[in-house]
């Protein structure tokens, strides 16, 4: 079973994807970390041809070991870098195979990101699109950072989130939108446990309907 979980930053998609993976006994990949790792690798490069070339090289050389420094990969600044490298077609092409290989392993997997249901796994068994309003997402990300002892400028963080949303949605090489067959889950007013229960219910209902359809055909 392949479960695709998409949505904007701090919508709760990573937490939900991790919870779904644990519930169904599936491996989980936060695909945003791939772009963050590439962005972090070229953080000292100035934008332009050299930046693009360095990002492409970093994407082609990426392996699982580059995803271990979770603290560095989850800063707001690294998120901005991720959205900058994500508009580079050759970066996306390099990371596509990494993601497809993970998704198609025996037994399936849970992947979360921005284009899983539209680009990476358009054939996923279940697709969820997670959303929440910008203010709620800003507060969630701020609390995550503050728990790590990071001082947060909420005004700047809010605008970083809005800026990244706009860049991701306008990315000509991306697929950041709700797939036609994706189930929308708004987590603005939901805690983690309630959101996970709702997500599990969507998966169970979808798989039951598919099983029923197969049996009747």
Image (cartoon, helix red, strand yellow):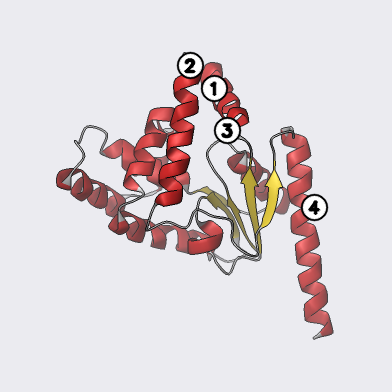
Nearer the N terminus, badge 1 or badge 2?
A: 1
Task: Identify the residue position indicated by label 1 in the image.
Answer: 142
Q: Position of residue 3 (x, y in %)?
A: 63, 58
Cα separation, mark 2 vs mark 3, equals 16 Å
Q: Which residue is mark 2?
A: 152
- Quadrant location of the N terminus in the rendered image: bottom right
> Which comes sooner in the sequence, label 1 or label 4?
1
> Alpha carbon of mark 4 to alpha carbon of mark 3: how far?
25 Å
* Lateral position of residue 113 relative to residue 96, left or right: right
Residue bearing mark 3: 134
Label 2, label 4: how many angstroms apart (C-alpha)? 35 Å
Displayed quadrant of residue 210: bottom right
Whether residues under marks 4 and 3 lie with C-beta atoms below 8 angstroms apart, the answer is: no
Please provide percent x and percent y for residue 152. 48, 16
At which x and y percent is residue 196? 74, 42
Residue 26 location in percent, x, y? 64, 54
Label 3: which secondary element: helix
Q: Residue at x 28, y 55 (%)?
A: 60
């Amino acid at each position: 079973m392949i479960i695709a979980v998409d949505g904007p930053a701090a919508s709760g998609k990573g937490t939900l994807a991790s919870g779904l993976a644990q519930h169904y006994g599936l491996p989980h990949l936060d695909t945003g970390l791939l772009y963050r790792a590439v962005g972090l690798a070229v953080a000292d490069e100035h934008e332009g041809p050299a930046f693009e070339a360095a990002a492409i090289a970093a994407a082609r050389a990426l392996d699982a070991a580059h995803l271990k420094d979770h603290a560095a990969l989850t800063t707001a600044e690294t998120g901005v870098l991720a959205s900058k490298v994500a508009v580079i077609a050759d970066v996306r092409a390099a990371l596509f195979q990494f993601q497809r290989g993970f998704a198609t392993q025996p037994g399936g997997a849970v992947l979360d990101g921005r284009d899983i249901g539209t680009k990476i796994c358009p054939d996923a068994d279940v697709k969820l699109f997670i959303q929440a309003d910008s203010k709620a997402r800003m507060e969630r990300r701020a609390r995550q950072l503050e728990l790590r002892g990071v001082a947060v400028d909420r005004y700047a963080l809010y605008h970083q989130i809005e800026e990244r949303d706009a860049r991701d949605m306008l990315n000509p090489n991306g697929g950041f939108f709700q797939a036609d067959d994706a189930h929308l889950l708004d987590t603005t007013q939901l805690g983690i446990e309630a959101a996970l229960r709702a997500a599990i219910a969507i998966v169970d209902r979808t798989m039951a309907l598919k099983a029923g359809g197969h049996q009747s055909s």
